[in-house]
């Protein structure tokens, strides 16, 4: 039975709680599909700042780069909030992992579960049939550009290269080929020079995928269309900041951000898998966090990095069965805790 190495980064807040359930569930299903997992745990985010003075140490980055996959819980919390540019912030650990591991494509699937149609703030008829994938550029743009702070001004620079846009667009078109064959490229080409470059490069990449339909949409219009006709989208490709905002907006189609998984991928099979939600320090330690997004992120890890798509399908089906049976964590109007939801998913797997 082959052994794979997974770096486990529980992080801050509810991160250790939801990661613990995902690990327990993966350990139950992986051996049934020919996998033995060697988990090795490390500090990242606020807990790393407390221990080492930095959100990501070189040793942790090296351990992650030598792993088959990385699973991350969440980072951040009011304890480490600061506007001082010289002080470390937990989010620097996340950005450092993305850039240090070369993970430039963030995949965020958005599919409302039929059992949760009524949990969405949008009417059922608006969200029914929605199955979209946000492909977000992850290592460029404002989050990685030159920045500075002066007494009376501050600046953040958005920079994109042709290569950064083209490799991300290729991801989107390849994904659309296995789905419904449509790519929506989101930019702000009526104002931003980087968006004009973005649009030109995406058009060039589309020429190599003649069977895929391409449409362009300005980001403000995309934000509106996501809540008015989400089922019309298939694959959305967009830059870092726009993707960050739009994917969180799209999460509410599912009823809760606690339902949204993600995968951050690069040129190889190494990927980092994490729930889209944050560290939720207000409920940390109470055992009430929804672990489903983390479990679904683990399913993406099984599919993309560990070569076990059948195991991933089983996890997805188990979550579907639990929700269809009416079981709900607090963020979806229920009363079941983190461990109880994990127990139900394990039972559904059996």
Image (cartoon, rainbow, N blue to C red):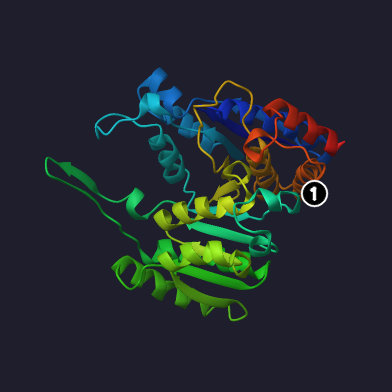
- Which quadrant would the N terminus be assigned to in this image? top right
Seen from the viewer's position, the closer of residues 162 and 148 is 148
246 versus 9 height, above or below: below
Q: Which secondary structure, mark 1?
A: helix
**Is 102 situated left or right of 171 in this image?**
left
Residue under the point 32% across and 73% down: 190
Q: Quadrant of residue 107?
A: bottom right
Q: Quadrant of residue 7?
A: top right
Seen from the viewer's position, the closer of residues 324 and 184 is 324
| Outermost residue toward the top in this view | 51
227 versus 71 height, above or below: below
Mark 1 is surrounded, within 10 Å at the Cα level, by few (under 14), some (14 to 19) or many (20 or more) other residues, namely few
Residue 71, visible in the rendered structure: yes
Q: Position of residue 9 (x, y in %)?
A: 54, 30
**Is 40 situated left or right of 51 in this image?**
right
Q: Position of residue 287 (x, y in %)?
A: 63, 23
Residue under the point 60% across and 49% down: 269
270 versus 110 height, above or below: above
Residue 1, visible in the rendered structure: no
Q: Which residue is mark 1?
A: 310
**Is 328 situated left or right of 288 in this image?**
right
Residue under the point 29% across and 70% down: 191
- Which quadrant would the C terminus be assigned to in this image? top right
């Amino acid at each position: 039975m082959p052994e794979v190495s997974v770096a486990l980064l529980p992080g801050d807040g509810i991160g250790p709680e939801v990661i613990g359930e995902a690990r327990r569930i993966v350990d139950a299903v992986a051996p049934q599909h020919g996998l033995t997992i060697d988990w090795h745990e490390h500090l990242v985010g606020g807990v790393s700042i407390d221990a080492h003075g930095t959100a990501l140490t070189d040793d942790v980055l090296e351990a992650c780069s030598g792993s088959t996959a990385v699973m991350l819980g969440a980072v951040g919390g009011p304890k480490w909030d600061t506007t001082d540019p010289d002080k470390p912030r937990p989010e620097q650990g996340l950005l450092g992992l993305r850039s240090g591991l070369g993970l430039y494509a963030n995949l965020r699937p958005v599919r409302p579960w039929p059992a949760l149609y009524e949990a969405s703030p949008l009417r059922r008829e608006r969200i029914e049939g929605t199955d979209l994938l946000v492909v977000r550029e992850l290592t460029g743009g404002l989050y990685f550009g030159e920045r500075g702070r002066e007494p009376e001004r501050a600046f953040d620079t958005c920079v994109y290269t042709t290569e950064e846009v083209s490799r991300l667009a290729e991801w989107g078109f390849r994904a659309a080929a296995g789905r419904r064959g449509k790519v929506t490229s989101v930019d702000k080409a009526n104002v931003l020079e980087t968006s004009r470059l973005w649009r030109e490069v995406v058009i060039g990449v589309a020429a190599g995928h003649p069977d895929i339909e391409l449409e362009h949409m300005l980001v403000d219009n995309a934000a509106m269309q996501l809540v008015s006709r989400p089922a019309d989208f298939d694959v959305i490709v967009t830059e870092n900041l726009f993707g960050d905002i739009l994917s969180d907006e799209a999460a509410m189609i599912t009823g809760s951000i606690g339902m949204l998984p993600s995968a951050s991928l690069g040129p190889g099979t190494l990927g980092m898998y994490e729930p889209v939600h944050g560290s939720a320090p207000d409920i940390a330690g109470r055992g009430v966090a929804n672990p489903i997004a983390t479990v679904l992120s683990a399913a993406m890890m099984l599919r993309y990095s560990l070569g076990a798509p059948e195991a991933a399908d089983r996890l997805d089906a188990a979550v579907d069965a639990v929700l269809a049976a009416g079981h709900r964590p607090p963020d979806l109007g229920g009363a079941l805790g983190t461990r109880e939801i994990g127990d139900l998913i394990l039972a559904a797997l059996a």
